[in-house]
Amino acid sequence: MPGVPGTSYVGGAHHFVTGVIMRRLALVVSLVACPVFGLAAQARVFTHADTLRGSNTPERAWWDATFYDLHVSVSPTDSSIRGSNGITYRVLRPASVMQIDLQRPLEVDSMTQAGTHLAYRRDGNAFFVTLTAPQQTGDHNTVWVYYHGAYHPQAGPAQRGGGPFHWNTDTTGAPWIATSNEGTGGSTWWPLKDIPADEPDSQRIAITVPDPLIDVSNGRLRSTTHNGDGTTTFEWFVANPINSYDVEINATASYVPVRDTYNGVNGPLTIEFWPLALHQPLATALMPQVKTMLACFEHWFGPYPWYADGYKLIEAPYLGMEHQSGIAYGNKYLPGYIGRDLSGTGEGMSWDYIIVHESAHEWWGNNISAKDHADMWIHESFGMYAEALYLECVKDQAAGQRYLVGVRNNIKNDSPIIGTYGVNDTPRSQDRYYKGSNMLMTIRAVVDNDARWLSTLRGLNSTFWHQTVTAKEIRDFINTGTGVDLSRIFTQYQETTMIPMLEYRTEGKTFSHHWTNVVPGFDMPVRVGLGSDGNYTLLRPTTAWQTVPSTMSDTTELRVDPAFYVTASRAKP
């Protein structure tokens, strides 16, 4: 996700929203995050609508989405859409009421099953449809939803969080239409079960646009149908599970594809870049970087997860988005992050930020997807950490480390990087990028075994291949894979805003130290320089004072290995 300047229970009751808050309860639910290890209580207010959107309600829990058959006709002249979605599902247990999500200003025209019209009622952005046919465990059934609506046109390049539609014009003055709806949800423009824990096994995306527009969406193009009424339907098909917020429309008359093949670990992978015609030479010049990136990430994370659907970059009128197998690209063909280095070190200026960061999400966010938006750190912390690994591939480990140390200047520590569960709460702080990636660099330094670190990153992607996960599953796997108990480190960096401080003092030839500003029992090892030879010594501090031999003078500031995201301070006399 571009964020940046751009579950699931996790070990403590302060983050767990218990049960399902029934929609028949009060319309506003006030949830207060309890103080965590010295943090002041932060009042958070979530609405009844937040709970309907973010929790696995009884009307969602009984069915599993297996296929979405989406058909949408887009009219740029009045910023309207009209469409239908066939929602095929597997019955997990018998029930008669189904929740389907579709946000205003869109309206449902009708819902049917097996040709029978169904009754439904609207509760904000959720529709509750009463099914008349028996729903037997194990059955596969389909509900069709027909809908329409018009949006207020959004002019100019929009960032993430705008949309869902960006109504623009391309370099020729023709309409340029694109969607982006991370956080706000796919239900901003199509009806579905809009909860990240449930992904369909596959999906059709059939988009009808006025001639001469060309639509590019996720997966493979199956057919192009000229309808005889001045419109054309582009039918795309995704053969794999897909995040609902990843489904996309990109349409303009100026797309001219650049095609190539990458010989990857699972064989030939088609790679495409769909730029505006004016930018075709610039897109062609970026293809070698795409191949280098894919080779790097296949080394660190395992096979690209979507060989069946291919790899695409699609120029968009906004910064970018990790739409699965069809990444939206809006970095303006500039180095770094729209021409600047997020780290301030120079290390971020030799590569295209959107290509590297958004492609990393094909593994972290698309292959491995968080069950709850509160755990978007799984997507973003690994996504930004992958940027450093790319630098390690093309340069060396020191360059990647310098980059992550540089982005520490962007860390605000204004809130924990894990949000509140069950209410579609994506933490607003960008620390899940900057702080989360530095946490992962710190963990690698703690593990101090690169072969094991590599196997852990690959193992995560193979074990949770095409799955939705909880934070606990990811944390437990890393603990097991590395052979190191990292539980307190995860708690420290993800569930608090405190940065560990190594407090120390020197007395003659001894060095005394302990951790402060940490969670109870925090005992992370750290490497520090205790002499003038430039070498580092591994210490194993706890919250209790310890003493080791040292030749460090009483006036020298302590050197801490920059791979560790900590602070150090000389104790006051």
Image (spheres, grey):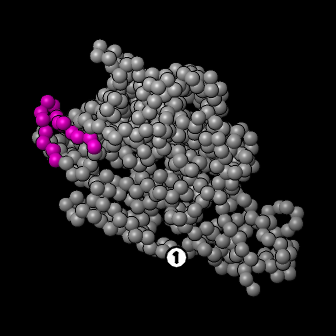
Is there any visible trace of residue 86 in the rendered image? no
Q: Residue at x 69, y 72 (%)?
A: 502
Asked where in the image residue 247 lies, by quadrant, the reply is: top left
Asked where in the image residue 79 lies, by quadrant, the reply is: top left
Where residue 478 appears, x then y in whole percent? 55, 54
Dot 1 surroundings within 10 Å: few (below 14), some, or many (20 or more)?
few
Disc 1 secondary structure class:
loop
Q: Residue at x 87, y 73 (%)?
A: 551
Where residue 68 appears, x then y in whole percent? 31, 34
Q: Main secondary structure of the magenta part?
A: strand
Q: Which residue is mark 1?
A: 38
Highlighted range, magenta: 105-121
Instruction: Give the left or right position of residue 305, taking residue 545 as reference.
Output: left
Instruction: Give the left or right position of residue 33, taking residue 506 as reference.
Output: left
Instruction: Give the left or right position of residue 545, taking residue 317 as reference.
Output: right
Residue extending farthest bottom = 573
Closest to the observer, 154 or 460: 154
Relative to 30, say whether 109 is above or below: above
Residue 251 highlighted magenta (yes or no): no
Where residue 333 appears, x then y in whole percent? 61, 33
Is there any visible trace of residue 197 in the rendered image? yes
Closest to the observer, 163 or 119: 163
Q: Residue at x 75, y 86 (%)?
A: 573
Q: Residue at x 39, y 27 (%)?
A: 237
* Numbered-mark total: 1
